[in-house]
Image (cartoon, helix red, strand yellow):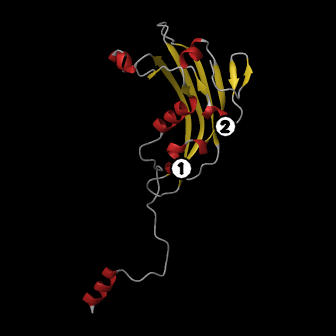
């Protein structure tokens, strides 16, 4: 069930008009049980937690959220989130723009309480367990997954350290000392 209104309904699919997916709030278990879908564009400017890593905030990400049941016949409720697009990260070596394509497919298993989830199930690499809620902010789910996908220290494969531009600065004190020593 979707609790925020500005969406065009087409059967079980909710298509968010531009930028509205970030404001969408769903009843997670009901959304999954009904196998609802929502999709839309998310402006990169709406991803506040990654701004410091970007060289530009232009563009958007194509996001889709699908509710359903686990594939392992256990009957667990899941959300499947896909995020596609491109970010322009700041290379931590040369400080120039670095293309970073995103193509994420995440399975988020809804659990009543993360504390009560069996340890062997938490270690399963096929999905992440998240606490189910009747008010789940889709924007927060999207932003969390984008943040987790970012490299710790983005760098080009091959680049140089930034160089100082030619400026008419005073000579370095060490250069002055070197001249004194030679004389």
Asked if 32 appears above or below 40 in the picture, the reply is above
For disc 1, the marked residue is 54
Q: Position of residue 77 (x, y in %)?
A: 51, 13
Asked if 161 appears above or below 147 in the picture, the reply is below
Q: Nearer the viewer, mark 1 or mark 2?
A: 2
In front of the other: 3 or 72 = 3
Separation (CA) of disc 1 from disc 2: 19 Å
Q: Position of residue 54 (x, y in %)?
A: 53, 50
Residue at position x 62%, y 29% in the image: 24
Q: Position of residue 167 (x, y in %)?
A: 49, 78
Looking at the rendered image, the quarter that the C terminus falls into is: bottom left
SS under mark 1: loop
SS under mark 2: loop
Disc with the residue nearer the chain's start (1 vs 2)? 2
User: Do the numbered discs 1 and 2 sit on residues whose CB atoms are within 8 Å?
Assistant: no
Asked if 142 appears above or below 180 in the picture, the reply is above
Asked if 13 appears above or below 175 in the picture, the reply is above
Looking at the rendered image, the quarter that the N terminus falls into is: top right
Label ID, residue 178: none
Q: Could you classify mark 1 by the number of other residues whose Cα lies within 10 Å: few (under 14), some (14-19), or many (20 or more)? A: some
For disc 2, the marked residue is 19
Q: How many marks?
A: 2
Residue at position x 58%, y 28% in the image: 82
Residue at position x 57%, y 12% in the image: 33
Q: Could you classify mark 2 by the number of other residues whose Cα lies within 10 Å: few (under 14), some (14-19), or many (20 or more)? A: some
- Would residue 80 appear left or right of 123 to someone viewing this image? right
Q: Position of residue 98 (x, y in %)?
A: 53, 50
Which residue appears farthest toward the left when viewing the image? 181
- Would residue 56 appear left or right of 179 to someone viewing this image? right
Residue at position x 61%, y 14% in the image: 35
């Amino acid at each position: 069930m979707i609790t925020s209104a500005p969406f065009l309904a087409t059967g079980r699919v909710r298509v968010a008009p531009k930028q509205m997916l970030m404001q969408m709030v769903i009843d997670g278990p009901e959304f999954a049980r009904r196998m609802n879908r929502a999709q839309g564009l998310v402006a990169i400017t709406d991803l506040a937690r990654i701004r410091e890593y970007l060289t530009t905030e232009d563009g958007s990400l194509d996001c889709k959220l699908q509710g359903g049941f686990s594939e392992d016949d256990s009957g667990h409720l899941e959300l499947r989130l896909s995020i596609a697009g491109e970010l322009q990260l700041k290379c931590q070596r040369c400080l120039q723009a670095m293309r970073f394509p995103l193509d994420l497919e995440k399975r988020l298993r809804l659990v009543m309480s993360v504390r009560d989830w069996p340890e062997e199930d938490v270690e399963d690499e096929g999905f992440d367990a998240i606490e189910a809620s009747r008010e789940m902010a889709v924007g927060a789910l999207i932003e969390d997954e984008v943040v987790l996908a970012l490299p710790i220290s983005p760098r080009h494969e091959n680049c140089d350290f930034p160089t100082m531009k030619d400026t008419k600065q005073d000579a370095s004190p060490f250069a002055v000392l070197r001249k004194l020593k030679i004389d």
